[in-house]
Structure formats: structure tokens, C-alpha cells
Amino acid sequence: MRTIAALWLLAAGFAFAEPPSVETLFKPPQFALMRISPDGASIAALAPVAGRQNLVILDTRTHKPTPVTGFTDRDVVDLRWVNSKRLLVQTGSIGTRVFDYKGGGLFAIDKDGSEGRMISEGGADEQSSSGSLKPLIPVRGLPGDSDDLIAQEIIPRIDGTHPGELVRVNTRTGRRTNVGFPKADSGEGESWVADDKGVGRVQVVDSQGKVRIYYRANADAPWQKLDEYPELSSGWYPVAVADDDKTLIVVDRHNRDKAAIARYDPATKTFGEVLAEHPQVDLSNLIRDQGRVVGVAYEADRGGSAYFEEDLAKIKSAIDRALPNTVNGMNWSRDRSLILVTAYSDVNPGSYYLLDMKAGKMEWLVDRKPWIKPKEMAPMQPVRYTARDGLPIPAYLTLPKDSNGKNLPLVMVIHGGPWVDGDEWGFDPEAQFLATRGYAVLQPNFRGTTHYGWKHLEASFGQWGLAMQDDITDGVKWAVEQGIADPKRVCIYGASYGGYATMMGLAKTPELYRCGVNYVGVTDVNLYLTATWTDYSQSDAAQYAIKGMVGDASKDAEKIKAVSPVALASRIKAPVLMAYGAADVRVPIEHGQRMRSALESAGNKPIWIVADGEGHGFREMANQKMFYEAMEKFLAENLK
């Protein structure tokens, strides 16, 4: 009897080993966003310094990190080398989600910490004393050792922001020189393509429901319109000036479902050679070397990259052979003698390696999150299921490690957006948080998720709460049919649009779900379309694109009411947890307050969490712990 008891305790201890804490899974990495300098002497990275994420520099010989910035009231969220000595950093506020940034100032600084200068203002907490530095969006760097940067000015206005001039910025003096005037019909969706000389050669204007593309052959040539097409249609747009300085590199899907990378001749207005295409996904993310396009990165079932130059393709192939279980990316010194390799997987948040081409040796540098133990994490599997109308739905399935994968409690995790790239294969703190607590996790990239082709995107127009919701329902049914999910123990969870889908799922198919977690979610579609105090309400997108993709508040009032969870509260019988940021200007807390009142009136009192000072997704670790620990308790109580 004593032996049996001992064996039971051993089994219980194994089955209920302490899962990783919220802080372990969600805290910022030790090192992030590593980039090697053009001369190969240094590696720039982001790392915790003084309680915030700051810029550090590692010597490529000693690998010793040295702090360069010491912000204590903001984080460094992005970096790029201007030249081998100088860097550009963007400030903001990091967190588990990147729905929006607070701040966003641009600073230039030498790698030894000297010659620091603000060159672009961010939010109210990041303004210069004169308040005259118009915000900038970096467009591209310049070849060689120039201190200059090409960027687009953004003009703040009462009705939102408006694009300004394309400028060449001296990052030491802050002086701005115009290199491209906006067209008279410019709109907030305006973007630019500049050549190696820093001249604005292409202007894409997205406004009033139309896309217009303009081009000029050089700085002195007149602008000509290349094309115009409806915003909500499958078109094309330029992304680079080709090496011949005459043709353009474009993202093209005007006659295809999946966007390809192709050449375009503006003189004849004709499309030429297709440089790259993929059967599963759109291609748009170019890889550049000193401004030249040398490859393309993509997110299919797993991430990948392809190179147009044979030398780079051979290097990438050798790296993949050496690191076969990870997705591997690379950036390199100007002479390509040193290659900085980034490797990540579903169970590994990422590691960095340095490949010395002359020595023929690759050595490990650092891990992004060394406290994560890959062997204790749950693998993520790309899967596909078919929606009821025949549309293939890509998804990711994560099962608790060492489980038999059968009859498990399931959490459907629905991404925000909804018109974003969605979930990807890789280390996902939320999926790991749930899987290490014993839940199967299914993350569907339902219709409307971008980069899966035009048909996948267009099928979502006007389908909030309808076919988009059916895709999620069909995912639950697929998991049950596969024997993965216990049909009596399914919960739905999501943030932003995912929060909307959570509440809509509880109302539309109440028989499917035991509970729901709504994190900063839309609940009243009419409010989403008509609120004037959000950060998008005065945008061109709100006036044109959103009306076409969601609905018109006046013309489609009945349809909108029928897909608003706040109007369907009486149908929601399952327990609900809702969490909102008090300072959210993307999805104002009123969405949660209206839903809370409607549920309580229907006799269903939800668990209610509000974080003061937080916006669209919690950033402070204390608030993240509060939310995820509350969700852990909530799921345990409802999915026993």
C-alpha cells in the first residue's frame, strides 16, 4: 500500500509540475532585435537597462555588451544603423502586445553614446522644448557612410495626422531637406519609394477609397500617374527602384490571388519578370542590402526567406543545415565577411549566432530569453481545416507537452485586427501559458487574415459575426471531430477583434462554449463605427475602407445590430471575464461597460478587470500578471 501511494505521488508530481509563471513567459527578452554594423565591428541590440528596454552595443570580438542609451521613462522599441558609427532608435512603450505605441520619438546617437539628438517628436511625453520637430516615418537609409536618412514628415492635425514632405534628414544637425513634395490629392495613406540618391521617385496615395500611383524618372522629371484603382480591390504597389534605376520592384496581385514580387516598367506601364511567388501566401517583405533588393521573407506554415543572389542563397542553405530545427534569418556586414544569424522555433524564443565566413565558423552569441527551457515548452503544429463554404482556414495547434492529444479542454485563441497577418509559427507566450496549464490551443487565421491571398481577404468583407465567426465555429467542430477537444470543455478567448469574436461566439453558438475571455474587445459595432473619440475615427480608413469592410452605420443599421454582442447579451449563458484599459483610445472602455451592463441586466454578472493608465493591451508587468492570473483561475474553474 505504501508503494502504491508513493507511485501515485510521483505520478501526481510529474503531471502537476509547477508551470512557468506569467513573468517567466511574458517579460521582455534579455536581448532583442540584433543588427550588425556595416563595418562588422559592432552589433546593436535592445536589452533591459535601468528598468527599461534600451540600446546596447556588443563588440563582435569580445561579445561584451555596453549600454548606449539609459532612458528611464520610455523604452527603445526599434533600431537601425545609419552608418557604421551612428544609429537611429525609436522610443515607445513595450508590452505583450503591440496594438499601438505610446510615444514614438526618433533619436540618433553614436555607438559610443555621444552626439545624441532628437530628430523627430513622439507623443506628448516625448516633445522637444520648441515643439517644432514634426514626426517622421523612416523610409530608407543611404548607401555608404552618410549620416543622412530619408524619411516622411507627418503633420498632426485636429482631424488626425496628414502626410507631409519626403525629406533628407542629417542625423547630426537635424537639418531637413525636401526631396519629394506630396501630390495635391495626397491622403493619409501616402507612402514613398526613394532611390539610392535619396530622391523620391514613387508616391502611392491611398485616400477617399482609391489608390493612385505616381512616378517620376528623376528629381527634375514631371510626375506621371501610373495607375488608379479602388482601395478594396486586388491591385499592386511599388516597393523599390530596381538596380537599373529605370524599372520598379512591385508587389503585384492585380491578376493573381497571391501577391508576387515582380518587375514593372513605368515607361510602358507593363509588368515584367516575376521575381518570387509562393503557393500559400502573399509576398511583400523584401530583404535589402544597402538599399538593393536581394531577397524576400515570408510567413507560410512556418517562416522562411529566399535570396535572389546565389552567394546569399548558399550561405542561407549552409545555415539551415547547421540549424535544422529553427527558422533562420540573417543580416550581414557590408563585405559579408560576418553574418549575424537569428534562429527561433515554436519552443525557443530565439538565439543569435555569429558566422565568420573567413574562418568558416559559426558561434553562439546569446539567447533572447535564456530562462525559457525549450524542452519544457509545448510544440506548435501548423494545421488546416475547411470552413463550411469550402474556404481553407490555416491555423496553429498547440497541445500540452506529453499529453496524448485526445479529449482535452480546448481554448480557442482569436487574434485581433482583424485585417492583420494573424498568428504565426514560433514561440507564442500565450499559447505556452495555456498549454503548460493543460489546455489544447487552436489559433485560426480566419478569413480576413492578411497575407493568405485576395480571396481569403475579400471573403471577410461585411462578414463580422457571420462567415468570419463561422470560421471559428468550424475550427471548434474540427478539433472535436479530430478527437482533440472535449466538446464539453471549450473556452474562447481573444483581444481587440478577438474580444469581439469571443462575445459574438458566446451569443451566436452558446452551446459550444463553457466560458469566454474578452480582452479589450469591441462589443458594439455601431459604437465602433461612429465613436468620435477613438484614434482612428477621423481617419480616411474610417470614412471609406471600414465602411466597405464592416458596414455603414446608417445604411446597415439592422445588420450591424444583429452582429453586436451588446444587443445579444440575453443569449450569453456562459461565464465571462472581461478586461479593459482605462486609457484605451482604440477600443474605448465604453465597449466593456456597455457589455457589462447588458450582461448584468440579463442575469449574467461577468468578472470585470480595469487597468488604470493602460491602453489597448496591458504593458506594465503588474497588470499583465493581474490579467493572466485571473484568466488562469477563471479557466480552471470553468474547464474542470
Image (cartoon, rainbow, N blue to C red):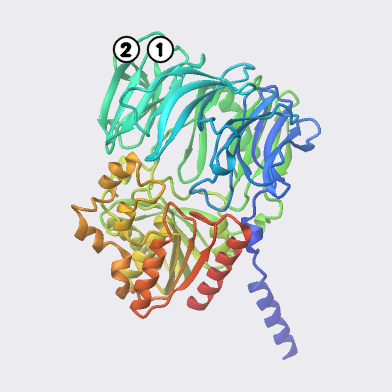
Residue 290's quadrant in the figure?
Answer: top right
Query: Foreground residue, 309 or 32?
Result: 32
Q: Position of residue 256 (x, y in %)?
A: 30, 33
Q: Amino acid at mark 1?
A: Lys
Residue indicated by mark 1? 246
On screen, residue 242 above or below 588: above
Q: Earlier in the sequence, mark 2 or mark 1?
A: 1
Relative to 428, is 110 on the left or the right?
A: right
Residue indicated by mark 2? 267
Q: Residue at x 74, y 26 (%)?
A: 41
Sort mark 2 into few (<14), some (14-19) or many (20+) by Cα contacts within 10 Å: few
Residue 407 in sight from this viewpoint: no
Q: Position of residue 236 (x, y in %)?
A: 33, 29
Residue 526 in sight from this viewpoint: yes
- Secondary structure type for disc 2: loop
Q: Position of residue 106 (x, y in %)?
A: 58, 33
On screen, residue 627 above or below 371: below
Query: Foreground residue, 308 or 565?
Result: 565
Relative to 107, is 134 on the left or the right?
A: left
